[in-house]
Image (tube, rainbow, N blue to C red):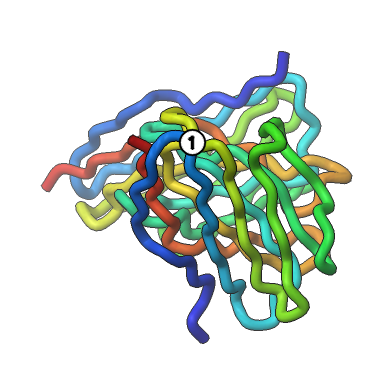
Amino acid sequence: SQKIEQNSEALNIQEGKTATLTCNYTNYSPAYLQWYRQDPGRGPVFLLLIRENEKEKRKERLKVTFDTTLKQSLFHITASQPADSATYLCALALRNYGQNFVFGPGTRLSVLP
Amino acid sequence: DAGVTQSPTHLIKTRGQQVTLRCSPKSGHDTVSWYQQALGQGPQFIFQYYEEEERQRGNFPDRFSGHQFPNYSSELNVNALLLGDSALYLCASSLSSENTEAFFGQGTRLTVV
């Protein structure tokens, strides 16, 4: 069956450390993958997009990797800050599916001061 | 640019009633998608509208219907409300070209009692 999972429901790290979030999927062939941030009671906010033929993307303190063999994406936040505390969602964009995304359940990140 | 706007922000309905939610896409966007997000879960795709027609549909019953207007704004209608329809309903807008991120509104929190 098709499944998309994120490593843990909640992740606590110390300020200044690197947070690493994992997104694994089975029986999907995504054309690209995205990461979103969602704060409580708000809509998701786009962070990064990585295509199937790309291995790594960076934006400021954010880095995402995409391994289509392992069917896994890793999302890193370096030098984490309490303001980074939020739920992070990965979303698969499937072929021939327009801009409709299959979302993972999310990981709630707490950065402790 | 106002981004994606949704109305109302909160709504309480009684089981069996009907509800209409509204969405105005980001300026320049022509595609609108609707998602349902239950508490603690990732958004689930309901359907997408492009050129005033439903282009894709997720695994939702016919009680969920929608419409897109010539100005690209959209409505989501839910008939015969069930308690399980209580959720955050998110509207996302994008361009019809592929490999672009979606911009989400703040959502409508629907509570069915």
In the image, is residue B69 above or below residue B18? below
> Does residue B80 appear left or right of residue B112 in this picture?
right
Residue on which the image places disc 1: B16
Residue A34 at x, y percent in the picture: 61, 49
Residue A57 at x, y percent in the picture: 61, 54
The image quadrant of residue B10 is bottom left
Task: Depth check: give the residue in front, B20 or B51.
Answer: B20
In this view, which residue lies farthest toward the left?
A113
> Does residue A34 appear left or right of residue A108 in this picture?
right
Residue A70 at x, y percent in the picture: 69, 23
Q: Residue at x 72, y 44 (%)?
A: A93
Task: Depth check: give the residue in front, B53 or B106.
Answer: B53
Label 1, residues with CA under 10 Å away: few <14, some 14-19, many ≥20: some
Under mark 1, the amino acid is Gly
In this view, which residue lies farthest toward the front?
B16
SS for dot 1: loop
Quarter that holds the C terminus of chain B: top left
